[in-house]
Image (tube, helix red, strand yellow):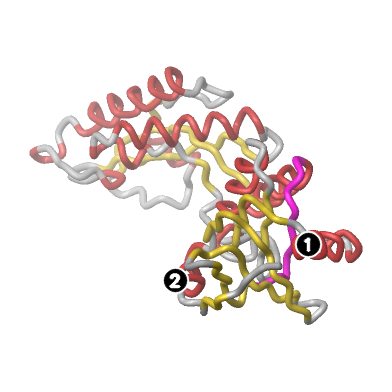
Amino acid sequence: MQPSTSVRTHNLSLMESEQYDVLVIGGGVTGAGVALDAVARGYKVALVEKVDFASGTSSKSTKLVHGGIRYLPNFDFALVHEALVERGTLLRNAPYLVKPVGFVLPLYEGDRHPVGLPFSTPGGIGLGLIMDIGLWMYDLMAGMFAGSRGVKRHRRLSRNKVMELAPSLVTEKLKEGFIYYDAQTNDARLTLALIRTAAQFGATIANYAEVTSFVTENGKVTGAHVLDQLGNQEITVRARHIVNATGVFSEHIEELPVMNHRFR
């Protein structure tokens, strides 16, 4: 997604002439979320992205909005709670982008560690019951902390039903299974929705705008030099706070040169 030429040019001009509270570096889902949260709280926000929005990890994720079920066997209830609340919020706020999806969990005869459980029982006895109890806890926490938001509760599946829902599974020693529900999203579209919403709240945003170095004044970072890759011009963006939301490129940003400068 590239803003229209006139809007993008206008935004870059604003960035050069205005003083911002927050400059966000990175136009992925994290940067978009930070920008939206900050501008919604009344801060003056600018965001720059060196290529296109959601061009990195934010368009190459698992596409899942999960409630942290994998943390439940480790008894990390705080993390499960956090993930379930976020899942519920996304299902409520963006039902056009986030949809419930079912996951089949097969159980095999003698399987001591089904679906990644960190513990086992002698001969695998009782693992079905343990799975059932864990999934009931997951459903209960979802209802308590986030509401169901249209997400169904888990249910036990017969061997034949597992084979019907997941025909590519290995069937040898397959006993039964479960189906539970989380959510799925289009990660790139979700990121762009956050970007657009942040812009509607007043954030100044530009893509193909790469931070090349930082500016300091009296020993404090007070801005960044930004290269307009389409216009081949460099501008200076001034901000009281700078957020590095570049994900796997964060170390590269931290290693950028810092230049002393006095703003007029």
Left or right: residue 158 versus residue 99 is left
What residue sits 73% from the left and 65% below the top? 207
Identify which residue is drawn at 37% across, 37% down.
69
Q: Looking at this view, is 6 or 175 the one in front?
A: 6
Q: Position of residue 255 (x, y in %)?
A: 46, 76
* Neighbours of disc 1 within 10 Å: few (<14), some (14-19), many (20+): few
User: As shown in the figure, which amino acid type bears the numbered disc 2?
Assistant: Glu
- The residues colored magenta run 201-210
Q: Is residue 64 magenta?
A: no
Q: State the residue position of label 2.
A: 251
Would you name the residue on which mark 1 appears? 17
Q: Position of residue 263 (x, y in %)?
A: 67, 68
Residue found at the far left of this picture:
122
Mark nearest the camera among 2 and 1 is 1
Q: How many marks?
A: 2
Q: Nearer the viewer, residue 13 or 132?
A: 13
Q: Is residue 234 left or right of residue 67?
A: right
Image quadrant for the N terminus? bottom right
Judged from the image, the secondary structure of the residue bearing numbered disc 1 is: helix
Q: CA distance from mark 2 to mark 1?
A: 28 Å
